Image: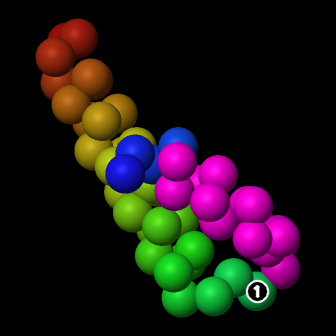
Amino acid sequence: MSLLEAAIAVTDRGETWLGMPDADSLYILLASLLLAFIAFVILMRVRF
């Protein structure tokens, strides 16, 4: 299951990111932010 599919599944349940998400969507959000940060760091290290 990709992050995009997970994000779509979360938003399809009618939850708003501005509201209080349940544990599943919160973990998905944290995981996606962590992966984005790691990817950013790797790209910066490769580029320079």
Is 37 within the magenta?
Answer: no
Q: Between residues 18 and 44, which one lies in front from this camera angle?
A: 18
Relative to 30, say whether 42 is above or below.
above
Residue type pointed to by label 1: Met
User: Residue at coordinates 53% horizontally, 43% vertically from top-left?
Assistant: 4
Residue at image x 23%, y 11%?
47
Q: Please give the range of residues in magenta.
A: 5-19
Residue 16: percent from the left, percent from the top?
82, 69
Query: In the image, is 34 to the left or to the right of 23?
Result: left
Residue 15 picture quarter: bottom right
- The quadrant of the image that shows the C terminus is top left
Q: Is 34 placed left or right of 30 in the picture?
A: left
Q: Extreme top residue here?
A: 47
Q: Is residue 24 above or below residue 42?
A: below
Nearer to the camera, 31 or 4: 4
- The residue wearing badge 1 is 20
Tell me the element at label 1. loop
Q: Residue at x 59, y 54 (%)?
A: 7
Residue 17 in picture, x, y percent from top left: 76, 67
Q: Residue at x 69, y 82 (%)?
A: 21
**According to the image, what is the colour scheme of the structure?**
rainbow
Which of these two is toward me, 19 or 1?
1
**26 versus 31 height, above or below:** below
Crowding at label 1, few (<14), some or many (≥20) Cα neighbours within 10 Å?
few
Percent position of residue 43, x then y: 27, 23
